[in-house]
Image (tube, rainbow, N blue to C red):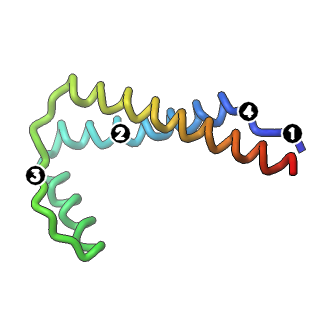
Amino acid sequence: MAGLNKNKVGLALGCFGALLHIVWSFFVAVTPSGVQSFYNWILALHHLSVPIQIMPFRLMNAVLLVIVVFILWYILGWVFASVWNWQMKK
């Protein structure tokens, strides 16, 4: 079996994570009160009550969020593929 391509796995995970956060940023921009309700519901499902308030949308924060998430998830995918390939050699 051929090993995983570390770059492709990193790009796939990076793009997926970035897409999730683009969607999140879109909803924060369009319906901040709806996002707040959704977040409160998710916390309640976990039996948590944390006083977190969704801040007003700022484009630069959204862009930085997407970039940082892409980089971190790319690294996660690269590390995952590396560990996978290492384990498959054994």
Q: Earlier in the sequence, mark 2 or mark 4?
A: 4
Q: CA distance from mark 2 to mark 1?
A: 32 Å
Image mark count = 4
| Residue 49 at x, y percent in the picture | 16, 70
Say what secondary structure mark 1 lies in.
Answer: loop
> CA gap, disc 4 to disc 1?
9 Å
Q: CA distance from mark 3 to mark 4?
A: 40 Å
Residue behind mark 2: 21
Residue picked out by circle 1: 2
Rendered residue at 37%/30% (across/down): 68
Kindly identify the residue that appears in the image at 22 percent across and 29 percent down. 61
> Looking at numbered disc 2 in the image, what kind of residue is underneath it?
His
The quadrant the N terminus occupies is top right
Tell me which numbered mark, 3 or 2, is placed earlier along the sequence: 2
Residue at the right extreme of this rendering: 1
Q: Which mark is residue 53?
A: 3
